[in-house]
Amino acid sequence: MSRSRRLEREAPLGAGADLFERASRALVTWEMHRRAGLVVVVDGPATVGRTVTLRPRTGPGAWLRITAPCEVTAVIDRPDARGFTYRTLPGHPERGWETFLVRRDPATDEVRLLIEAESAHARLTAALGGPVVRAEQERITRRYLAALVES
């Protein structure tokens, strides 16, 4: 239906083991998504095979009552990095995947959030609303990045 788009964003969160633990916990328990303004329907933390449905509380996605079902496909749990990847499921306006990773540099103690995604429109309505859909994705990504600064 449309060409695939790649997104990579990274933001510093601060430094320290405590921050790494708090930010990692907020990520895998879906708190980052909630702080970013999404309604999160899920029955536990991010684990492989877990499904989650996300809905924007504000903005065009909320007005259009968009729901975004996803399934966690990978979990990263290392001393210096924690996070997960999910893929979109049928009913999502896009098809693709997104990775969220909190990393702590052992040399500098700096903690950063990395978001990577690749997606394409899965529905005709998403393709027709291309600029609005892309703007909404960017808005939510910025909110994700800001959400963990609060950790």
Image (cartoon, rainbow, N blue to C red):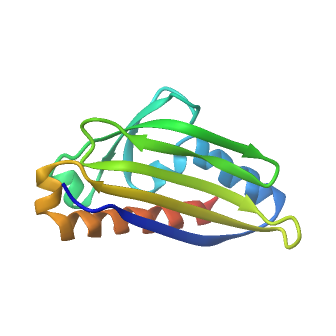
The image position of residue 3, as x and y in percent, is: 27, 62
Q: Is residue 60 left or right of residue 106?
A: left
Which residue lies most toward the right here?
107
Question: Could you tell me residue 12's position as x and y percent?
Answer: 65, 72
- Quarter of the image holding residue 39? top left
Residue at left offset 53%, top offset 52%: 99
Q: Which is more toward the observer, 132 or 65?
A: 132
- With 97 as the anchor, is 146 left or right in this view? right
**Quarter that holds the C terminus:** bottom right
**Above-or-below relation of 11 to 52:** below
Residue at the spot 78% in from the left edge and 46% down from the top edge:
78
Q: How many marks?
A: 0
Q: Considering the image in quadrants, where does the N terminus appear?
A: bottom left
Image coordinates of residue 11 in percent, x first then y, are 60, 72
Question: Residue at horizontal 38%, vertical 49%?
Answer: 96
- Image coordinates for residue 98, horizontal then vertical, percent: 47, 52
Residue drawn at the location 28% of the way across and 67% of the way down:
134
Q: Nearer the viewer, residue 98 or 27?
A: 98
In the foreground, 4 or 22? 4
Q: Is residue 86 left or right of residue 69?
A: right
